[in-house]
Amino acid sequence: MRAAIVEAPGVLAIRTLSDPVPGPYEALTRQLFGGICAATDRHLVEGALPIPGISYPLILGHEAIGEVIAVGAKVRNMKPGDLVTRSGAPATDGCAAYWGGFAELGLASDFAAMRDDGLPEADWSPHLINRVLPPGTDAAAATMMITWRETLSYITRLGPVAGKRLLILGSGGNGFSFLVLALALGAEAVAMVGNPGWAAHAGDAGAAGFADYRDPAAVAGLGTIAGSAGFDMLVDAVGHSGGIEAVLPMLAPGAAIGLYGIEALGERMAALKTIAAQGFDVHGPGDYAEGEAHDQAAAMMASGALDARLWFDPAAPYPLDSIGDAIAAVAGRRSLKAVVRITG
């Protein structure tokens, strides 16, 4: 199989690797499409992901959709032809897998069969991300399910959203996901701070206001949207130094604050302790469980409440050989997200 490999920081290549072999609880998948994550994928390519233990070379990709082509002997909840989320190739031929989505073949685990057969929860719970999508789902558009599930789980854990006023820091793919989800969940108003090139796009998506992150006066002006009561929730989708502190005066007492972005992770985690001491309800990165939001996100996609076309054109994927161009398009803010055709 061919796969997108980060040979070393800054070195991206397409290499042929050994085909994966499914175990008894695994399905073999033909990888159809993969989404580009502006944070994780770019950081892995650059060698800058702030998570210990990353090793190179590695197989890139954690937002892939695969089509089941064969199943192991104990698989009962997946069948050939099913579309499965977050399938990916395992580590092989000296390559680690983070998480191996950009390979022509992948594996997905039948967590329900593992659970029902009495395997320890630690064995099956990591595979809650492997879920079968409804028949007829657009596989290219469905690469957004990973972003939608993750951000939906995160924002839901901040507390009830209906009737609340939210402030979103960041106008990338994740920032827009928080914006759209908050409105779909019944938020009274959502304001966004970000790159001015996305201001009109945010307005089209329903933002009540937008401010250039480089303009402190414009950012402060968003406070009129929340009024004297202040914003009830803040989500920092980027994680730059000082971002949260700059808008604390605009928040309601005890407001929920979510640091989702990881750009300055170590410094930001220390800052969260100081912010929490001021009486805010603070949530850090990783406070989500993607699998728990699958059913709700799938229903929202089916209803049209979540539409991938806000982020990219599902009908215009990049070929696998041009994955570097797809990453550059997202990094250069020419697209909120990008999708790569892996096979077919």
Image (spheres, rainbow, N blue to C red):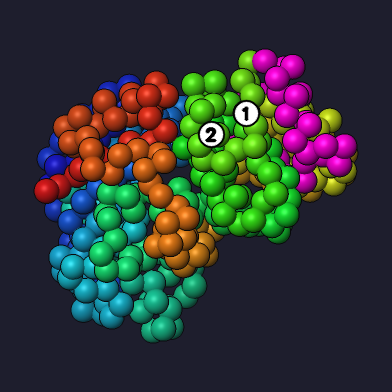
x then y, percent, for residue 59: 28, 41
- The amino acid type of the residue labelled 1 equals Phe
Task: Say if the magenta span includes residue 254.
Answer: no
**Separation (CA) of disc 1 from disc 2:** 7 Å
Viewer can see residue 90: no
Viewer can see residue 189: yes
- Circle 2 residue: 202
Q: Secondary structure at mark 1?
A: strand
In this rendering, position of residue 277 left or right of residue 15: right
Quadrant of the rendered image containing residue 29: bottom left
- Circle 1 residue: 210
- The amino acid type of the residue labelled 2 equals Ala
Location of residue 73 with respect to 177 vertically, above or below: below
Residue at 39% across, 84% down: 117
Residue range highlighted in magenta: 215-242
Q: Secondary structure at mark 2?
A: helix
x then y, percent, for residue 263: 56, 29
Residue 235 versus residue 118: which sits nearer the camera? 235
Q: Are marks 1 and 2 in contact (CB under 8 Å)?
A: yes
